[in-house]
Image (tube, rainbow, N blue to C red):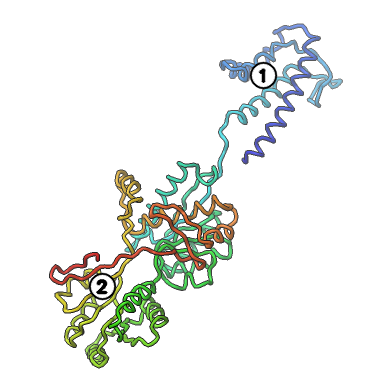
Amino acid sequence: MERRERLTVLYYLLSELTHHTSAMARLKRRMTVRQSHVAKGPLPRLRRTLRGGEGPVEQLPFLLTRVLPLRVPPLWGGSGEAGGEVPWPQEIALRLTGLVLLLSFFLLAPTARAEILIGVAGPLSGQFGVLGNQMKIGVDAAVKAINANGGINGEPLGVLAVDDACDTRRAVEAAKEFIAKDVRGVIGHYCSGTSLAAALVYKERNIPMITPTATAPQLTSGLHWNVFRLAAKDDALAALAVGRITAFASLQTPAYIGDGQAASEALQVATKTSLPDIATFTFKSGAANIAKLRQDLNKLQPNAIILGIPGAEAARLMLILTDIGFTGRVYGGEGLLSDDFTSRAGVLNYEVLAVVPADPIQHQLAAPVIAELTLTGLEADGAALPAYAATQMFAAAAKATSINDGKAMAQWLRNGQNVDTILGKISFDANGDVNNPAFTWYRWVGVSKRFLPE
């Protein structure tokens, strides 16, 4: 019950109690005190039950029954005997007992506080279960900390986690479950496909969604005002690599090599936007395709290559580049840091650079959270810390606007408000993408067969 409602009820209870007490006092002045007529009926049993208390609330029913049960006209329509008369002390005592007990509840019971639910959606079981549970660990930890500091304007947060198995159909079902449970915001989904599928459902019900991990550019393409992300987009490598390429005057023949998959295609589009004349190639398996790619690259003789292919294919490409005498620079993403690449690539005659999102575990502000999770036997791996920060972003928006107004929260976030999180100050741009995402560049050291930070 809301505080205002409780105070209203309390006011009327006090008024009723005052009325009955005044009537009791007027009648008591006309009475002689006796006890002989209160030995029967339910009131003595109630009196014996309450008599053991030491406070005035417990003693009041007992004291009232000490009054002589004179027969008087009923004061407020009580059931009486012939002529409308009632044994007034028992009648009044019973009524006052009920009022006092109710009054005690309103005075002594703690104020009930509604729990504000936020949803967590991702793969919580199966082969990808570890990834989704990392996200849930972060949200749970953030909610615990937020509630310890007053919750959302005095109201506590609660977490509802649903397993979508990175499946679009189950993601929609999860979104509908969140709506049925009156979830006010969602941290997730984990995968890009499920995020895209669920975003439309949340949009219809004005529910903001912050994904710590989804990277598909379409999520923040302007179609979903309610979607935000902490992860860098698939095409983020393009701007970083192009920036490096254009910084070197001698690099005049760039090339892009992708595998035709969605993430690779997004990176290629972004690259051509910045470098319209860049040559593009598709890496396909099969001897004939690889021979054709070798021939095309040998003819072009690029001196800068941006990669949009997995680690294993990138390692095979290194052999081709070595064979044609490539001496420029290769720029790639997280795929280059995989074992598929590092176990196959050796000493190279050219530079290979990989850029990846900065490891959140290395952030100094996250150290206390990492320590607390470690003490409880949990790890801050994967999406745990980004999910924690996403929850902080949601809480900040809810406090600044209204937990009941998803559009207001979303607009507040899109206005570029800086929020202090365990990953530093974070803000979103007008599209819902995180501003100034942190990246780390790594350089391949062939002798030791590993990447080292620049």
User: First in sequence: mark 1 or mark 2?
Assistant: 1
Residue 340's disc number = none
Q: Nearer the viewer, residue 6 or 360?
A: 360
Number of marks in picture: 2
Q: Nearer the viewer, residue 142 or 274?
A: 274
Q: Amino acid at mark 2?
A: Leu
**Which residue sits furthest front?**
249
Give the CA distance from mark 1 to mark 2. Answer: 87 Å
Tell me residue 238's x, y (percent). Answer: 37, 76
Secondary structure under badge 1? helix
Tell me residue 271's x, y (percent). Answer: 38, 80
Secondary structure under badge 2? strand
Q: Nearer the viewer, residue 441 or 69?
A: 441
Report the residue marked by disc 1: 43
Mark 2 nearby-residue class (10 Å; few <14, some 14–19, many ≥20) = many
* 398 sits to left or right of 5: left
Report the residue marked by disc 2: 353
On-image quarter of the N terminus: top right
What residue sits 47% from the left and 56% below the top? 418
* 368 sits to left or right of 391: left
Tell me residue 304's x, y (percent). Answer: 28, 81
On-image quarter of the C terminus: bottom left
Task: Verify CB contact (< 8 Å) between mark 1 and mark 2.
Answer: no
